[in-house]
Image (tube, grey):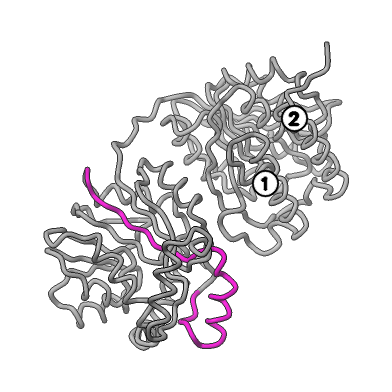
Amino acid sequence: MNKQELTSFFDRVSGGRGRWRKKNAYYHNTLVNFFQSRILQGDSVLEAGCSTGEMLGKLNCAGKAGFDISGEMIKIAGEKYPEISFYKDDIEALSISEKFDVIILQDIVGHLNDAWKAFGNLHKVSRPGTKIFITYYNQLWEPVIVLAEKLDLKMPEPLQNWLDLSDIENLLFLNDFKVVKKGRFFLFPKYVPFFSDFINKLAMNSSFLNKFCLITYIEAHPLPRLVRGEYSCSVVIPCRNEKGNIEGAVKQTPELGTGMELIFVDGNSTDGTVETIKEMIAKYPEKNIKLIHQGSGTGKGDAVRKGFDASAGEILMILDSDLTVPPEDLGKFYDAIASGKGEFINGSRLVYPMEKQAMRFLNYLGNKFFSFIFTWILGQKINDTLCGTKVLFKKDYERIKEGRKYFGEFDPFGDFDLLFGAARLGLKIAELPVRYRARTYGDTKISRFTHGLLLLKMSAVAFIKFKLNYHAEK
């Protein structure tokens, strides 16, 4: 759901918001008590996504303000609580610049189209010492929440991002925030005298029951924003029969760093891809566009390596030519590596909801399985092993290249060659969530079963090399 559709949805349901809050008063009062226990009387408080203002109205503090993307919600809030400052604003394009002691994001993470951008904007309204509280649903409760909406027990909401605590913590880290506390509470959301309070208190203090609690929370504090280094960039785009995506890649890729080159590596296309690339070179002379022919080599991994070898940039980036990962997101990858958040930035398509048909179900399950396996083997969290968007410094790639024979050269994708090499060198791997879109041109080059067997083989190799520390004599 795009921003306009989301705004229209909340405008439509604004009139019934009060009824739903009364219907689930125990849940909402629990959240009010949670925030109030962490707010000092002299604090100024800003609530992002304040809806019709009921929670702010119940808080006891020196100053209160709230904003929401829904003009109808803000209108109702202003009429009910004229003493509070309310604004129509969007956390992903925030215009407020006043600083606050406390910032609250109650249950809005699921509606963010770009949580990375939203969290980054919190620096506009925070100062050193500002406390940021984020609450959200536990992922385990997704089927229960969906069922409650269908049974008219909860206000229906659009499709949400089901981010877990580690996803939220990572997005805050990427935007220079330090998580100081996190946890879960509230196991039984309906009020039954004596029983509800007893079981919810028990769940807070039971390590087993706590995992199943409905509400997850994070308290974060802003850190000084890290200064980005300035580097030149090479964006390598492997392509085979992607004629319809070439101009989109050229137009949508932002200018990055001190200078950028686009390197298309063609894998013997037969649909006019090469001719289209040459047209782009002539049409956009202000852009540094190069064409390399893969020749007798096969597979994306071979194409990436040839593109990297021909690159001149200090930072190397891979962009899949199917454009299922938006080229505009490369700016986030540049920020992450140039500010030192990681030495190897790996895209993750498995955080946000995907467009329909963006990834086949068996592919999705396979990615989840290999994510678990490689996180365990490499000792660093890897949500998505096969996301095509990966970014690293060229100097580190040269070191990976030197040690490639250690793992063998049978990876047709190139993803594991880079991940294994980065892990072996001890590079800090940071993950950056991306939106994964459906293809608009061409066909996928992935064979689920043939390539699935290759992935299992690579898993075995990684287990032997990293866990058993075994390698054959040269």
Label annotation for residue 372: 1
| Residue range highlighted in magenta | 128-157
Residue 32: percent from the left, percent from the top?
29, 71
Q: Is residue 365 above or below residue 380?
A: below
Label annotation for residue 303: 2
Q: Is residue 271 above or below residue 50?
A: above
What residue appears at the point 30 percent right and 44 percent down from the top-left corner?
222
For numbered disc 1, what is the local secondary structure?
helix
Label annotation for residue 14: none
User: Count of labels shown?
Assistant: 2
For numbered disc 2, what is the local secondary structure?
helix
Tell me whether circle 2 and circle 1 mark residues in contact (CB < 8 Å): no
What amino acid type should be assigned to the residue bearing mark 1? Phe
Residue 253: quarter of image: top right
User: Going from the N terminus, do you reach mark 2 or mark 1 first?
Assistant: 2
The crowding category of the residue bearing disc 1, from other C-alpha atoms within 10 Å (few below 14, some 14 to 19, many at least 20), is: some
Residue 110: percent from the left, percent from the top?
47, 64
